[in-house]
Amino acid sequence: MELELRILLISVVTLGSVFFIILFRRNAVPAFTCIWLLVPKLGTNLFGIYEIPLFSFVEMACSLTLLVVVLGVSRNSKLLTLQSYSARSLMQLEIFVIAFFILVSAQQVVSSMFFLYARDLGSPIPPGRVFVGIVKDFSSIVFLVACYKLIFTMKQVERCLLIFIFVLIILAAELAAVTWIGPVKNFIGKYSFDGFGRFNSIFINDYNLFGLVCAVGGLSALHFFRKNIRGVWILLFLIATLLVIFNLKRNMIFAYFSGAVVFWYAGYFQRWSLWKRVMLIVTMAVSILLLNFSQLNLPGIDARDYIENEYISKRVANYANLDSIKVRMGIQLRAFEVIVDKFPFGVGNNMLRYHMGANSPQIFKISDSVVLDGYNRVANGNVVTEAHNGYMEFIASYGLLGFFALLLLISTIARNLLKARFTLHSQDSLYPLGLSISVLFGIYYLFLGYPQFYLVVFLLLHLSFLLARESYGKNLTWSNRLIPSS
Protein backbone atom coordinates (compact mmCIF):
# COMPACT_ATOMS: atom_id res chain seq x y z
CA MET A 1 0.00 0.00 0.00
CA GLU A 2 1.40 3.42 -1.00
CA LEU A 3 2.48 5.86 1.71
CA GLU A 4 -0.06 8.51 0.67
CA LEU A 5 -2.89 6.00 0.78
CA ARG A 6 -1.80 4.80 4.24
CA ILE A 7 -1.69 8.37 5.55
CA LEU A 8 -5.18 8.97 4.17
CA LEU A 9 -6.43 5.76 5.76
CA ILE A 10 -4.89 6.69 9.14
CA SER A 11 -6.52 10.13 8.99
CA VAL A 12 -9.96 8.76 8.11
CA VAL A 13 -9.96 6.00 10.75
CA THR A 14 -8.53 8.28 13.45
CA LEU A 15 -11.03 11.08 12.81
CA GLY A 16 -13.87 8.58 12.64
CA SER A 17 -12.85 7.08 15.99
CA VAL A 18 -12.63 10.51 17.61
CA PHE A 19 -16.07 11.39 16.27
CA PHE A 20 -17.43 8.12 17.66
CA ILE A 21 -16.25 8.99 21.19
CA ILE A 22 -17.64 12.52 20.90
CA LEU A 23 -20.96 11.11 19.70
CA PHE A 24 -21.16 8.73 22.68
CA ARG A 25 -19.42 11.00 25.21
CA ARG A 26 -22.08 10.24 27.83
CA ASN A 27 -20.69 6.68 27.67
CA ALA A 28 -17.13 7.66 26.81
CA VAL A 29 -15.41 4.74 28.57
CA PRO A 30 -17.47 2.00 26.81
CA ALA A 31 -17.01 3.89 23.51
CA PHE A 32 -13.22 3.99 24.00
CA THR A 33 -13.26 0.29 24.89
CA CYS A 34 -15.18 -0.53 21.72
CA ILE A 35 -12.72 1.37 19.54
CA TRP A 36 -9.72 -0.16 21.35
CA LEU A 37 -10.99 -3.66 20.62
CA LEU A 38 -12.36 -3.26 17.09
CA VAL A 39 -9.92 -0.99 15.25
CA PRO A 40 -7.66 -3.35 13.25
CA LYS A 41 -4.20 -3.67 14.82
CA LEU A 42 -2.23 -4.87 11.81
CA GLY A 43 1.30 -3.54 11.57
CA THR A 44 3.03 -1.03 9.36
CA ASN A 45 3.17 -3.34 6.36
CA LEU A 46 -0.46 -2.48 5.64
CA PHE A 47 -1.93 0.23 7.83
CA GLY A 48 0.91 2.19 9.44
CA ILE A 49 3.86 4.45 8.74
CA TYR A 50 7.42 4.71 10.05
CA GLU A 51 7.12 1.43 11.98
CA ILE A 52 4.12 2.80 13.88
CA PRO A 53 0.86 0.87 13.39
CA LEU A 54 -2.44 2.53 12.58
CA PHE A 55 -3.82 1.61 15.98
CA SER A 56 -1.25 3.74 17.84
CA PHE A 57 -2.46 6.88 16.04
CA VAL A 58 -6.05 5.97 16.83
CA GLU A 59 -5.22 5.17 20.45
CA MET A 60 -3.42 8.48 20.93
CA ALA A 61 -6.17 10.58 19.35
CA CYS A 62 -8.95 8.79 21.21
CA SER A 63 -7.07 9.10 24.51
CA LEU A 64 -6.76 12.85 24.01
CA THR A 65 -10.47 13.02 23.22
CA LEU A 66 -11.28 10.96 26.30
CA LEU A 67 -9.10 13.31 28.36
CA VAL A 68 -11.06 16.31 27.08
CA VAL A 69 -14.30 14.60 28.09
CA VAL A 70 -12.88 13.83 31.54
CA LEU A 71 -11.71 17.42 32.05
CA GLY A 72 -15.20 18.60 31.14
CA VAL A 73 -16.71 16.75 34.09
CA SER A 74 -17.17 19.21 36.96
CA ARG A 75 -16.89 18.15 40.56
CA ASN A 76 -18.71 20.17 43.23
CA SER A 77 -17.37 19.12 46.63
CA LYS A 78 -20.33 20.78 48.37
CA LEU A 79 -22.63 18.13 46.90
CA LEU A 80 -20.55 15.27 48.30
CA THR A 81 -21.76 13.95 51.64
CA LEU A 82 -19.23 11.75 53.40
CA GLN A 83 -20.66 10.46 56.65
CA SER A 84 -18.08 7.70 56.93
CA TYR A 85 -14.40 8.28 57.58
CA SER A 86 -13.63 4.89 55.99
CA ALA A 87 -15.43 5.86 52.79
CA ARG A 88 -13.51 9.11 52.64
CA SER A 89 -10.22 7.29 53.16
CA LEU A 90 -11.10 4.83 50.40
CA MET A 91 -11.74 7.64 47.97
CA GLN A 92 -8.44 9.30 48.89
CA LEU A 93 -6.66 5.99 48.37
CA GLU A 94 -7.95 5.74 44.82
CA ILE A 95 -6.72 9.26 44.10
CA PHE A 96 -3.30 8.31 45.52
CA VAL A 97 -3.15 5.17 43.36
CA ILE A 98 -3.93 7.21 40.24
CA ALA A 99 -1.31 9.83 41.13
CA PHE A 100 1.32 7.16 41.73
CA PHE A 101 0.68 5.52 38.36
CA ILE A 102 1.00 8.91 36.69
CA LEU A 103 4.40 9.30 38.35
CA VAL A 104 5.49 5.83 37.22
CA SER A 105 4.38 6.53 33.66
CA ALA A 106 6.31 9.80 33.56
CA GLN A 107 9.42 8.07 34.89
CA GLN A 108 9.35 5.41 32.19
CA VAL A 109 9.41 8.05 29.44
CA VAL A 110 12.71 9.28 30.86
CA SER A 111 14.00 5.70 31.11
CA SER A 112 13.02 4.92 27.52
CA MET A 113 14.92 7.90 26.20
CA PHE A 114 17.93 7.20 28.45
CA PHE A 115 18.38 3.60 27.28
CA LEU A 116 17.16 4.08 23.69
CA TYR A 117 20.61 4.56 22.20
CA ALA A 118 22.52 2.17 24.43
CA ARG A 119 25.39 0.73 22.41
CA ASP A 120 25.48 -2.71 23.98
CA LEU A 121 21.99 -3.80 22.92
CA GLY A 122 21.67 -7.31 21.55
CA SER A 123 19.14 -6.05 18.99
CA PRO A 124 18.50 -2.44 17.94
CA ILE A 125 15.26 -0.88 19.19
CA PRO A 126 12.94 0.09 16.31
CA PRO A 127 12.32 3.86 16.55
CA GLY A 128 8.56 3.39 16.34
CA ARG A 129 8.61 1.06 19.36
CA VAL A 130 9.34 3.93 21.75
CA PHE A 131 6.43 5.97 20.41
CA VAL A 132 4.10 2.98 20.69
CA GLY A 133 5.16 2.41 24.31
CA ILE A 134 4.68 6.07 25.27
CA VAL A 135 1.25 6.14 23.62
CA LYS A 136 0.18 3.01 25.47
CA ASP A 137 1.35 4.43 28.81
CA PHE A 138 -0.40 7.74 28.22
CA SER A 139 -3.60 6.03 27.11
CA SER A 140 -3.64 3.69 30.10
CA ILE A 141 -3.33 6.64 32.53
CA VAL A 142 -6.11 8.56 30.77
CA PHE A 143 -8.30 5.44 30.87
CA LEU A 144 -7.65 5.02 34.60
CA VAL A 145 -8.60 8.65 35.30
CA ALA A 146 -11.68 8.28 33.08
CA CYS A 147 -12.85 5.24 35.05
CA TYR A 148 -12.52 7.25 38.26
CA LYS A 149 -14.37 10.32 37.00
CA LEU A 150 -16.95 8.81 34.65
CA ILE A 151 -17.88 5.41 36.14
CA PHE A 152 -19.61 5.50 39.50
CA THR A 153 -22.37 2.87 39.25
CA MET A 154 -22.39 -0.86 38.61
CA LYS A 155 -24.59 -0.38 35.55
CA GLN A 156 -21.89 1.69 33.93
CA VAL A 157 -19.39 -1.10 34.56
CA GLU A 158 -21.84 -3.55 32.99
CA ARG A 159 -21.94 -1.43 29.84
CA CYS A 160 -18.22 -2.00 29.46
CA LEU A 161 -18.72 -5.72 30.03
CA LEU A 162 -21.36 -5.81 27.30
CA ILE A 163 -18.76 -4.40 24.91
CA PHE A 164 -16.54 -7.42 25.58
CA ILE A 165 -19.47 -9.76 24.94
CA PHE A 166 -20.28 -7.86 21.72
CA VAL A 167 -16.67 -8.24 20.55
CA LEU A 168 -16.77 -11.94 21.53
CA ILE A 169 -19.72 -12.42 19.15
CA ILE A 170 -17.88 -10.60 16.36
CA LEU A 171 -14.75 -12.73 16.83
CA ALA A 172 -16.79 -15.94 16.79
CA ALA A 173 -18.58 -14.80 13.63
CA GLU A 174 -15.26 -13.90 11.96
CA LEU A 175 -13.73 -17.28 12.81
CA ALA A 176 -16.78 -19.11 11.48
CA ALA A 177 -16.78 -17.03 8.29
CA VAL A 178 -13.08 -17.44 7.45
CA THR A 179 -13.34 -21.17 8.20
CA TRP A 180 -16.50 -22.19 6.38
CA ILE A 181 -17.39 -19.44 3.90
CA GLY A 182 -15.12 -19.62 0.87
CA PRO A 183 -15.38 -16.03 -0.46
CA VAL A 184 -14.79 -14.54 2.99
CA LYS A 185 -11.84 -16.88 3.59
CA ASN A 186 -10.27 -15.87 0.27
CA PHE A 187 -10.78 -12.16 0.99
CA ILE A 188 -9.61 -11.78 4.61
CA GLY A 189 -8.40 -15.24 5.61
CA LYS A 190 -4.73 -14.35 5.18
CA TYR A 191 -5.19 -11.47 7.63
CA SER A 192 -7.22 -13.45 10.17
CA PHE A 193 -4.57 -16.16 10.58
CA ASP A 194 -0.84 -15.80 11.07
CA GLY A 195 1.92 -17.79 9.38
CA PHE A 196 1.53 -20.65 11.88
CA GLY A 197 -2.21 -21.02 11.29
CA ARG A 198 -3.15 -19.36 14.59
CA PHE A 199 -6.32 -17.27 14.57
CA ASN A 200 -5.38 -13.65 15.29
CA SER A 201 -8.51 -11.91 13.95
CA ILE A 202 -8.28 -8.86 11.71
CA PHE A 203 -9.43 -6.77 14.67
CA ILE A 204 -7.18 -8.15 17.43
CA ASN A 205 -4.16 -9.29 15.37
CA ASP A 206 -2.73 -11.17 18.35
CA TYR A 207 -3.72 -14.67 19.39
CA ASN A 208 -2.89 -13.97 23.05
CA LEU A 209 -5.07 -10.88 23.12
CA PHE A 210 -7.74 -12.82 21.24
CA GLY A 211 -7.77 -15.41 24.04
CA LEU A 212 -7.95 -12.76 26.78
CA VAL A 213 -10.83 -10.92 25.11
CA CYS A 214 -12.77 -14.18 24.77
CA ALA A 215 -12.00 -15.09 28.40
CA VAL A 216 -13.24 -11.74 29.74
CA GLY A 217 -16.32 -12.00 27.52
CA GLY A 218 -17.05 -15.52 28.77
CA LEU A 219 -16.77 -14.56 32.45
CA SER A 220 -18.91 -11.48 31.80
CA ALA A 221 -21.57 -13.73 30.27
CA LEU A 222 -21.57 -15.74 33.52
CA HIS A 223 -22.25 -12.55 35.45
CA PHE A 224 -25.26 -11.67 33.30
CA PHE A 225 -26.56 -15.24 33.58
CA ARG A 226 -26.37 -15.00 37.37
CA LYS A 227 -28.18 -11.67 37.21
CA ASN A 228 -30.80 -12.71 34.65
CA ILE A 229 -31.11 -16.45 34.14
CA ARG A 230 -31.41 -16.84 30.39
CA GLY A 231 -30.03 -19.47 28.09
CA VAL A 232 -28.37 -16.95 25.77
CA TRP A 233 -25.78 -16.08 28.43
CA ILE A 234 -24.81 -19.74 28.90
CA LEU A 235 -24.59 -20.08 25.11
CA LEU A 236 -22.21 -17.12 24.97
CA PHE A 237 -20.16 -18.59 27.81
CA LEU A 238 -19.86 -21.89 25.93
CA ILE A 239 -18.83 -20.06 22.75
CA ALA A 240 -16.18 -18.16 24.71
CA THR A 241 -14.98 -21.44 26.24
CA LEU A 242 -14.62 -23.06 22.81
CA LEU A 243 -12.67 -20.06 21.52
CA VAL A 244 -10.34 -20.09 24.53
CA ILE A 245 -9.67 -23.81 23.99
CA PHE A 246 -9.23 -23.18 20.25
CA ASN A 247 -6.58 -20.61 21.24
CA LEU A 248 -4.40 -23.58 22.34
CA LYS A 249 -2.57 -21.63 25.06
CA ARG A 250 -2.23 -23.83 28.14
CA ASN A 251 -1.77 -20.92 30.51
CA MET A 252 -4.80 -19.18 29.03
CA ILE A 253 -6.99 -22.28 29.34
CA PHE A 254 -5.85 -22.88 32.92
CA ALA A 255 -6.34 -19.22 33.91
CA TYR A 256 -9.78 -19.08 32.29
CA PHE A 257 -11.13 -22.21 33.91
CA SER A 258 -9.64 -21.14 37.26
CA GLY A 259 -11.51 -17.86 36.93
CA ALA A 260 -14.72 -19.69 36.04
CA VAL A 261 -14.37 -21.99 39.08
CA VAL A 262 -13.79 -19.00 41.36
CA PHE A 263 -16.86 -17.28 39.90
CA TRP A 264 -18.95 -20.37 40.53
CA TYR A 265 -17.64 -20.65 44.07
CA ALA A 266 -18.19 -17.00 44.98
CA GLY A 267 -21.47 -16.64 43.11
CA TYR A 268 -23.17 -19.92 44.02
CA PHE A 269 -21.32 -22.46 46.17
CA GLN A 270 -20.44 -19.97 48.92
CA ARG A 271 -24.11 -19.06 49.27
CA TRP A 272 -25.38 -22.63 49.53
CA SER A 273 -26.37 -24.30 52.75
CA LEU A 274 -23.89 -26.66 54.39
CA TRP A 275 -25.70 -29.86 53.41
CA LYS A 276 -25.79 -28.88 49.72
CA ARG A 277 -22.05 -28.20 49.78
CA VAL A 278 -21.32 -31.55 51.41
CA MET A 279 -23.55 -33.43 48.96
CA LEU A 280 -21.84 -31.85 45.97
CA ILE A 281 -18.34 -32.58 47.27
CA VAL A 282 -19.24 -36.19 48.09
CA THR A 283 -20.85 -36.68 44.67
CA MET A 284 -17.80 -35.33 42.86
CA ALA A 285 -15.42 -37.43 44.98
CA VAL A 286 -17.39 -40.64 44.32
CA SER A 287 -17.57 -39.88 40.58
CA ILE A 288 -13.79 -39.47 40.41
CA LEU A 289 -13.23 -42.74 42.25
CA LEU A 290 -15.61 -44.64 39.98
CA LEU A 291 -13.99 -43.25 36.85
CA ASN A 292 -10.75 -45.24 36.71
CA PHE A 293 -8.93 -44.08 33.61
CA SER A 294 -6.21 -46.66 34.08
CA GLN A 295 -8.61 -49.41 33.02
CA LEU A 296 -9.85 -47.74 29.86
CA ASN A 297 -6.81 -48.89 27.84
CA LEU A 298 -7.28 -46.22 25.22
CA PRO A 299 -4.98 -46.56 22.20
CA GLY A 300 -2.36 -43.90 21.60
CA ILE A 301 -3.65 -41.06 19.42
CA ASP A 302 -1.38 -38.99 17.22
CA ALA A 303 -2.91 -35.55 16.68
CA ARG A 304 -1.07 -35.21 13.38
CA ASP A 305 -3.33 -37.90 11.92
CA TYR A 306 -6.36 -35.63 12.37
CA ILE A 307 -5.03 -32.05 12.16
CA GLU A 308 -3.57 -30.78 8.91
CA ASN A 309 -1.84 -27.72 10.38
CA GLU A 310 1.61 -28.81 11.55
CA TYR A 311 2.03 -26.12 14.23
CA ILE A 312 -1.37 -26.81 15.81
CA SER A 313 -0.93 -30.59 15.69
CA LYS A 314 2.43 -30.28 17.52
CA ARG A 315 0.86 -28.12 20.23
CA VAL A 316 -1.93 -30.65 20.75
CA ALA A 317 0.46 -33.61 20.74
CA ASN A 318 2.87 -31.94 23.21
CA TYR A 319 0.33 -30.39 25.57
CA ALA A 320 1.84 -32.31 28.52
CA ASN A 321 5.44 -31.46 27.66
CA LEU A 322 7.01 -29.32 30.40
CA ASP A 323 10.21 -28.40 28.55
CA SER A 324 8.72 -25.05 27.54
CA ILE A 325 8.40 -24.13 31.23
CA LYS A 326 12.10 -24.79 31.74
CA VAL A 327 12.97 -22.76 28.66
CA ARG A 328 10.92 -19.86 30.01
CA MET A 329 12.67 -20.23 33.34
CA GLY A 330 15.99 -19.69 31.58
CA ILE A 331 14.61 -16.59 29.83
CA GLN A 332 13.36 -15.24 33.15
CA LEU A 333 16.76 -15.76 34.80
CA ARG A 334 18.27 -13.60 32.10
CA ALA A 335 15.50 -11.04 32.57
CA PHE A 336 16.28 -10.89 36.27
CA GLU A 337 19.94 -10.18 35.47
CA VAL A 338 18.88 -7.24 33.29
CA ILE A 339 16.61 -5.91 36.05
CA VAL A 340 19.48 -6.03 38.55
CA ASP A 341 21.86 -4.38 36.08
CA LYS A 342 19.52 -1.46 35.27
CA PHE A 343 18.03 -1.09 38.76
CA PRO A 344 16.61 1.25 40.06
CA PHE A 345 15.70 2.52 36.59
CA GLY A 346 13.44 0.81 34.11
CA VAL A 347 14.37 0.17 30.50
CA GLY A 348 11.01 1.43 29.23
CA ASN A 349 7.68 -0.08 28.27
CA ASN A 350 8.15 -3.37 26.38
CA MET A 351 11.89 -2.78 25.96
CA LEU A 352 13.23 -5.64 28.08
CA ARG A 353 13.42 -7.98 25.08
CA TYR A 354 16.05 -5.75 23.45
CA HIS A 355 18.22 -5.62 26.58
CA MET A 356 18.40 -9.35 27.33
CA GLY A 357 20.98 -9.81 24.58
CA ALA A 358 23.09 -6.92 25.86
CA ASN A 359 26.13 -6.97 28.16
CA SER A 360 24.37 -7.20 31.52
CA PRO A 361 26.60 -9.23 33.88
CA GLN A 362 25.79 -12.90 34.31
CA ILE A 363 24.68 -13.81 37.84
CA PHE A 364 23.41 -17.37 37.57
CA LYS A 365 25.34 -20.56 36.88
CA ILE A 366 22.89 -22.90 35.18
CA SER A 367 23.37 -26.68 35.13
CA ASP A 368 20.07 -27.84 33.62
CA SER A 369 20.50 -28.13 29.85
CA VAL A 370 16.93 -27.10 28.95
CA VAL A 371 16.99 -24.06 31.27
CA LEU A 372 20.41 -23.15 29.86
CA ASP A 373 19.04 -23.40 26.33
CA GLY A 374 16.32 -20.86 27.16
CA TYR A 375 18.88 -18.59 28.82
CA ASN A 376 21.28 -18.71 25.86
CA ARG A 377 18.55 -18.01 23.32
CA VAL A 378 18.02 -14.51 24.67
CA ALA A 379 21.43 -13.84 26.25
CA ASN A 380 23.18 -14.43 22.92
CA GLY A 381 20.62 -12.37 21.03
CA ASN A 382 19.47 -15.29 18.90
CA VAL A 383 15.84 -14.74 19.87
CA VAL A 384 14.19 -11.40 20.72
CA THR A 385 11.30 -12.16 23.04
CA GLU A 386 9.65 -11.05 26.26
CA ALA A 387 10.26 -12.59 29.68
CA HIS A 388 7.04 -14.65 29.69
CA ASN A 389 6.16 -13.17 33.07
CA GLY A 390 4.07 -10.02 33.33
CA TYR A 391 5.32 -9.15 36.80
CA MET A 392 8.98 -9.24 35.74
CA GLU A 393 8.17 -7.29 32.58
CA PHE A 394 6.51 -4.56 34.63
CA ILE A 395 9.42 -4.23 37.04
CA ALA A 396 11.92 -4.27 34.17
CA SER A 397 9.96 -1.58 32.34
CA TYR A 398 9.47 0.80 35.26
CA GLY A 399 12.25 -0.08 37.71
CA LEU A 400 11.93 0.57 41.44
CA LEU A 401 8.79 2.69 41.01
CA GLY A 402 7.32 -0.12 38.93
CA PHE A 403 7.98 -2.59 41.75
CA PHE A 404 6.08 -0.40 44.22
CA ALA A 405 3.32 0.25 41.67
CA LEU A 406 2.86 -3.49 41.16
CA LEU A 407 2.63 -4.08 44.91
CA LEU A 408 0.17 -1.20 45.22
CA LEU A 409 -2.02 -2.54 42.42
CA ILE A 410 -2.18 -6.10 43.77
CA SER A 411 -2.60 -5.13 47.42
CA THR A 412 -5.28 -2.54 46.63
CA ILE A 413 -7.41 -4.91 44.57
CA ALA A 414 -6.99 -7.68 47.16
CA ARG A 415 -7.84 -5.33 50.04
CA ASN A 416 -10.92 -3.95 48.31
CA LEU A 417 -12.25 -7.39 47.34
CA LEU A 418 -11.56 -8.68 50.85
CA LYS A 419 -13.62 -5.81 52.23
CA ALA A 420 -16.41 -6.43 49.73
CA ARG A 421 -16.78 -10.14 50.53
CA PHE A 422 -18.16 -9.45 53.99
CA THR A 423 -21.18 -7.67 52.53
CA LEU A 424 -24.35 -9.51 51.52
CA HIS A 425 -24.67 -9.20 47.76
CA SER A 426 -27.71 -9.46 45.52
CA GLN A 427 -27.85 -11.53 42.36
CA ASP A 428 -26.63 -8.59 40.26
CA SER A 429 -23.49 -8.01 42.34
CA LEU A 430 -20.24 -7.76 40.41
CA TYR A 431 -18.17 -9.17 43.27
CA PRO A 432 -17.92 -12.76 41.88
CA LEU A 433 -16.91 -11.39 38.48
CA GLY A 434 -14.31 -9.06 40.00
CA LEU A 435 -12.83 -11.95 41.93
CA SER A 436 -12.80 -14.29 38.92
CA ILE A 437 -11.16 -11.73 36.61
CA SER A 438 -8.52 -11.08 39.29
CA VAL A 439 -7.71 -14.80 39.30
CA LEU A 440 -7.75 -14.94 35.49
CA PHE A 441 -5.19 -12.16 35.07
CA GLY A 442 -3.19 -13.08 38.15
CA ILE A 443 -2.51 -16.54 36.73
CA TYR A 444 -2.15 -15.46 33.11
CA TYR A 445 0.64 -12.96 33.80
CA LEU A 446 2.62 -15.60 35.66
CA PHE A 447 3.37 -17.16 32.28
CA LEU A 448 3.14 -14.29 29.79
CA GLY A 449 4.05 -10.62 29.89
CA TYR A 450 1.86 -9.40 27.04
CA PRO A 451 -0.52 -8.09 25.90
CA GLN A 452 -0.70 -5.15 28.30
CA PHE A 453 -4.45 -5.26 28.62
CA TYR A 454 -4.85 -2.10 30.68
CA LEU A 455 -8.56 -1.81 29.81
CA VAL A 456 -9.47 -4.75 32.01
CA VAL A 457 -6.77 -4.25 34.65
CA PHE A 458 -7.72 -0.64 35.41
CA LEU A 459 -11.44 -1.29 35.06
CA LEU A 460 -10.98 -4.10 37.60
CA LEU A 461 -9.06 -1.74 39.89
CA HIS A 462 -11.86 0.83 39.80
CA LEU A 463 -14.51 -1.88 40.19
CA SER A 464 -12.78 -3.05 43.36
CA PHE A 465 -13.13 0.47 44.80
CA LEU A 466 -16.81 0.56 43.83
CA LEU A 467 -17.40 -2.78 45.54
CA ALA A 468 -15.53 -1.68 48.66
CA ARG A 469 -17.51 1.57 48.83
CA GLU A 470 -20.69 -0.43 48.45
CA SER A 471 -19.82 -2.19 51.69
CA TYR A 472 -20.22 1.11 53.57
CA GLY A 473 -23.90 1.20 52.72
CA LYS A 474 -25.47 4.47 51.76
CA ASN A 475 -23.08 6.66 53.70
CA LEU A 476 -21.57 7.92 50.45
CA THR A 477 -23.55 10.06 48.06
CA TRP A 478 -22.20 10.13 44.53
CA SER A 479 -24.08 13.20 43.37
CA ASN A 480 -20.81 15.09 42.95
CA ARG A 481 -20.06 13.40 39.66
CA LEU A 482 -21.90 14.95 36.78
CA ILE A 483 -22.13 13.22 33.42
CA PRO A 484 -21.07 15.52 30.59
CA SER A 485 -24.03 17.22 28.99
CA SER A 486 -24.89 16.31 25.44
Image (cartoon, grey):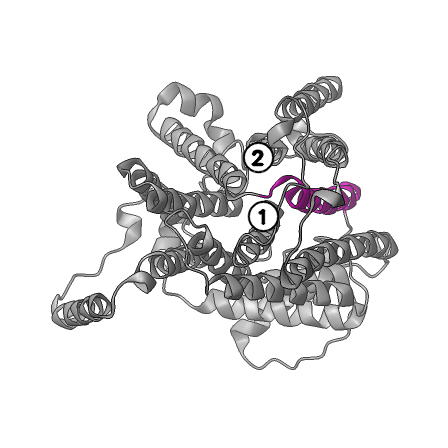
| Residue 280 drawn at (x, y percent) | 20, 66
* On screen, residue 483 above or below 409: above
**For the residue labelled by badge 2, is the local secondary structure a helix, a strand or a loop?**
helix
Residue 44 found in image quarter: top right
Q: Does any portion of residue 156 appear in the rendered image? A: yes
Quadrant in the picture for the C terminus: top right
Q: Main secondary structure of the magenta part?
A: helix
Give the residue pinned by disc 2.
30
Tell which of 189 and 308 is nearer to you. Answer: 189
| Residue 226 drawn at (x, y percent) | 34, 47
Q: Is residue 139 magenta?
A: yes
- N-terminal-most mark, 1 or 2: 2
Residue 459 bears which disc, if any? 1
Tell which of 429 and 198 is nearer to you. Answer: 429
Taking the spot 64% from the left edge, 72% from the top edge, the residue there is 333
| Tally of numbered tags | 2
Q: Amino acid at mark 1?
A: Leu
**For the residue labelled by badge 1, is the local secondary structure a helix, a strand or a loop?**
helix
Q: Amino acid at mark 2?
A: Pro
Rounded to the nearest angstrom, the CA distance separating label 1 from label 2 is 11 Å
Q: Which residues are magenta?
A: 126-152
